[in-house]
Amino acid sequence: MTQKIKVAYICVHNSCRSQMAEGISKLIAGDDFEAYSAGTETKPLINQDAVEVIKEIYDIDMNTSQSSKLISDIPPVDVVVTMGCNVECPFLPCKYKEDWGLDDPTGKDKEEFIKTAQLIEEKVRDLKNRINSLW
């Protein structure tokens, strides 16, 4: 692949699942695509339970490497992945879109955050493997 594919992970608040996906993607798929996360609203802080789990599993400190962003804050992208908003998911123009239908672990125990992170990693790896065939 000569040029990296720009992938955006979109959720309403851009504070938990989409942030986890951005961090994991930068770690395991950074050679293939540029990862962004964004939402239609932002929170002052990334979900600190998500931050803790991503730091523990992947040694990524999302408090320093990422911030909550609006859709208008990221560049045009090629691929949009919605997290499973359970509301009307935000729209972002793209060449390819898929929805991962992930439950929001916010307010649940640490085990749910770990499961969510592991599922996101699995889905990022799958997307990375398929990315060339999308074009």
Image (tube, helix red, strand yellow):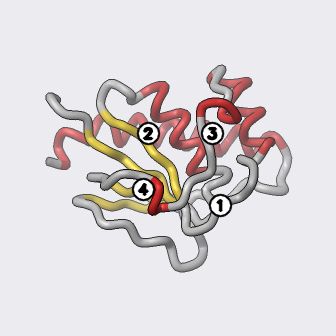
Say the numbered circle drawn on residue 69: none
Q: Which residue is mark 1?
A: 42
Which residue does the image show at 84% across and 56% down from the upper left? Answer: 107
Q: Nearer the viewer, residue 89 or 65?
A: 65
Give the number of the mark in front: 3 or 1: 1
Which residue does the image show at 56% across and 54% down from the upper left? Answer: 69
Q: Of label 3 and label 1, which has the lower sequence position?
A: 1
Label 1 close to label 4 by CB (< 8 Å): no
Q: Nearer the viewer, residue 98 or 60?
A: 60
Q: Which residue is mark 3?
A: 117
The amino acid type found where label 4 is placed reads: Val
Q: CA distance from mark 3 to mark 4?
A: 15 Å
Q: Secondary structure at mark 1?
A: loop
Q: Which residue is mark 2?
A: 124
Q: Which residue is mark 4?
A: 81
Where does the image place residue 24, in percent across and percent down from the top left? 53, 33
Which residue does the image show at 52% across and 56% down from the upper left? Answer: 38
Label 3 close to label 4 by CB (< 8 Å): no
Q: Secondary structure at mark 4?
A: strand
Q: Of label 3 and label 2, which has the lower sequence position?
A: 3
Q: CA distance from mark 4 to mark 2?
A: 10 Å
The amino acid type found where label 3 is placed reads: Ala
